[in-house]
Image (spheres, rainbow, N blue to C red):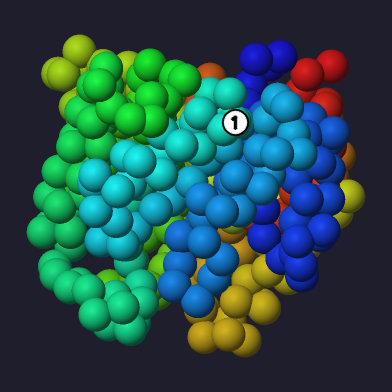
Amino acid sequence: MADLRFGVSLAGWSDGPALLAAARTAERAGFDTVTVADHLGHTAPFAVLAAAAAVTSRVRLRTYVLDAYFWNPALLAREAATLDLLSGGRLELGIGAGHMRHEHVDAGLPFPAVGERWAHTAAVVAEVRRRLADKSHVPAPVQQPVPMLVAGMGERALRVAAEHADIVGLAGAVQVAGRPAGTFTLTDTATTDERVGLVREVAAAHGRAPELDVLLQQVVLDADPEETATGASREATEHGMGWLTPELLLDTPFVLFAETAEDAAAELARRERRWGVRSWSTHAPWGPALARVAAAARN
């Protein structure tokens, strides 16, 4: 378990000093990666990661994930190479197809059907990779290659990720049928078995073996898991998400509920044996709990 990787989002800070403090805290807490999302109406990912790079020395810097429609491949390659250079080779470039229709509408960008979005994303990933690998690219990134992550959970997304990515981000969230785009539920264990199998099959067909990263939507310690799941389900129902039942929350591998950090570390070891996942990430509110789990896993 000592070589597992753990990541936490840089979010929720109120100003520049708070951002810098969050980045330093994440590195001191033992996280391997800090992550930043890419949503209109939120902070710009590369600026945030550049600031984090300036006050850290070890932690890796991940876009988790860029919306492929927000970026021209040539300009994205320039941004990525610049951050990799400034950080001494710590960038992990994560890209996805976007799932918030209203952001695309606000930005005047297309939001086609999911199949077309993933075809576009695959093209962007391939072109950015080509540019970053070009020895004449200016600026030149430190890493060759710059690790690329593609995240999703649907079959189209994971086929693209398995074919193109160095890291496959298993987001766990899937669209609820019949609901507006961006309405999600969590993937259960049986579906995770199928989706990880798909990744392995497609990757092997292309001579690849990408790392798997799981995004833990919640990490709750110091409480009985069944009680935690019941409370989380009740809160979800109050917000119109009644499909997040206690049974699903206890089954899905995309939350982590345990009475102790040691129990949680043992559960991650079980999931590693089942799916081969060696990288675990979470949102900022759950970072302190995951840091405790990381410490237990490494002891």
Q: Quick check: 69 above or below 40?
A: above
Quarter of the rendering containing residue 108: bottom left
| Quadrant position of the N terminus in the picture | top right
- x and y, in percent, of residue 7 in the image: 64, 38
The residue under label 1 is which amino acid type?
Answer: Ser
- Observer-nearest residue: 34 or 274? 34
Q: Residues within 10 Å of mark 1 (few under 14, many from 20)?
A: many
- x and y, in percent, of residue 164 in the image: 24, 31
Does residue 11 appear anywhere in the picture?
A: yes
Q: Residue placed at 75% from the left, 56% from the top?
A: 19
Q: Residue placed at 43% from the left, 51% from the top?
A: 65
Q: Residue placed at 84% from the left, 16% from the top?
A: 299
- Observer-nearest residue: 228 or 173? 173
Left or right of residue 295, residue 33 in this image: left
Left or right of residue 262, residue 4 in this image: left
- Observer-nearest residue: 130 or 191? 130
Does residue 264 appear anywhere in the picture?
A: no
- x and y, in percent, of residue 160 in the image: 21, 39
Q: Residue placed at 76% from the left, 61% from the top?
A: 16
Left or right of residue 32, residue 259 in this image: right
- Observer-nearest residue: 273 or 78? 78
Quarter of the rendering containing residue 180: bottom left
Tag count: 1
Q: Quick check: 103 above or below 34?
A: below
Q: Which residue is mark 1?
A: 87
Q: Secondary structure at mark 1?
A: loop
- x and y, in percent, of residue 25 in the image: 83, 43
